[in-house]
Image (cartoon, grey):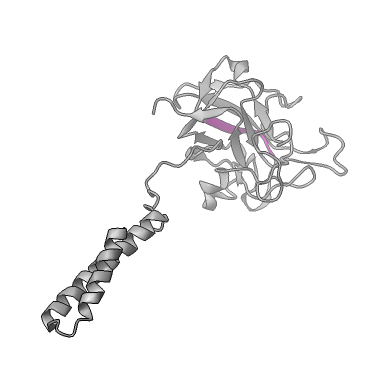
């Protein structure tokens, strides 16, 4: 860069000579402007001012949440939130806490079904629960009895390829292995509760070990016990699905 500076000083001195011709002065002005532009470019580049823009097509980092709604079928009395699909069931949960139902949900209706996919990541069998399904159940005040509240239940099935399915054996009486039993406590943006921590997030956690599976990418949820509701709110109300143990897909 110092070479550019020296040459510019020389050019300026030459332009001050009274006997310099008009043509030579014009030529010197052009050279001076060119050198000034080059110096400015180098200065900006050295300070990061001309750093290349981020590639908009760069693959986004996988998140622990489902990425895509593969298909769905609304049952009787359902459909609330359908106009906001798929976003309303993707991303983190927006729970209402123990005593209030979350409102950011898609109601399946009685017997309704939805299939979702982890696209850029996969759920694997780790220590303890591997993924969590979030609905919007709530307990009767003061919330001390986990069995005294409002619950709309669903069965949960999983698959690696979206073709062969494995069902978690469930019991609606005890609510074992049913989604829609535990209130959702995590609400990203309103509290600091991690939606991937089965000990604190709320929702219903599932362990692939119970099915003898190592990896899955698809989740199918089917309403099995619901109540009628107004304005399409009947049936299991899906908020979100989060992986507790996930990793980027190995084979795409």
Vertical side of 99 occupied by 44: above or below: below
Q: Position of residue 111 (x, y in %)?
A: 59, 35
**Left-right relation of 118 to 56:** right
**Left-right relation of 50 to 189:** left
Q: Position of residue 74 (x, y in %)?
A: 55, 42
Location of residue 107 (image quadrant) = top right
**Left-right relation of 60 to 82:** left
Image point 74% across, 39% down: which residue? 183
Image point 70% across, 23% down: which residue? 171
**Left-right relation of 64 to 142:** left
Location of residue 93 (image quadrant) = top right
Provide the major secondary structure of the magenta segment: strand
Q: Which residues are magenta?
A: 219-226
Image point 31% across, 59% down: which residue? 2
Q: Position of residue 114 (x, y in %)?
A: 53, 37
- Of 178 and 205, nearer the camera is 205
For residue 38: magenta?
Answer: no
Q: Position of residue 143 (x, y in %)?
A: 85, 40
């Amino acid at each position: 860069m110092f070479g550019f500076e020296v040459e510019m000083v020389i050019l300026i001195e030459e332009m001050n000579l009274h006997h310099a011709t008009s043509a030579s002065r014009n030529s010197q002005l052009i050279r001076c402007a060119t050198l000034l532009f080059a110096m400015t470019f180098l200065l900006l580049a050295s300070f990061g001012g001309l750093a290349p823009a981020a590639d908009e097509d760069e693959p986004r980092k996988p998140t622990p949440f489902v990425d895509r709604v593969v298909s769905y079928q609304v049952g009787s009395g359902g459909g609330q939130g359908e106009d906001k699909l798929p976003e309303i069931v993707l991303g983190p949960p927006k729970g209402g806490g123990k005593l209030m139902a979350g409102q950011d949900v898609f109601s399946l209706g009685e017997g309704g079904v939805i299939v979702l996919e982890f696209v850029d990541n996969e759920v694997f069998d780790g220590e303890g629960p591997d993924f969590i399904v979030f609905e919007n159940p709530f307990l009767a005040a003061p919330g001390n009895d986990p069995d005294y509240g409002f619950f709309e239940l669903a069965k949960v099935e999983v698959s690696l390829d979206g073709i062969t399915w494995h069902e978690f054996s469930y019991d609606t009486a005890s609510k074992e292995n049913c989604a829609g039993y535990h209130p959702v406590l995590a609400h990203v943006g309103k509290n600091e509760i991690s939606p991937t921590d089965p000990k604190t997030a709320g929702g219903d956690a599932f362990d692939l070990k119970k099915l003898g599976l190592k990896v899955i990418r698809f989740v199918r949820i089917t309403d099995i016990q619901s109540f009628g509701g107004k304005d399409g709110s009947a049936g299991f109300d899906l908020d979100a699905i989060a992986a507790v143990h996930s990793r980027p897909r190995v084979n795409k």
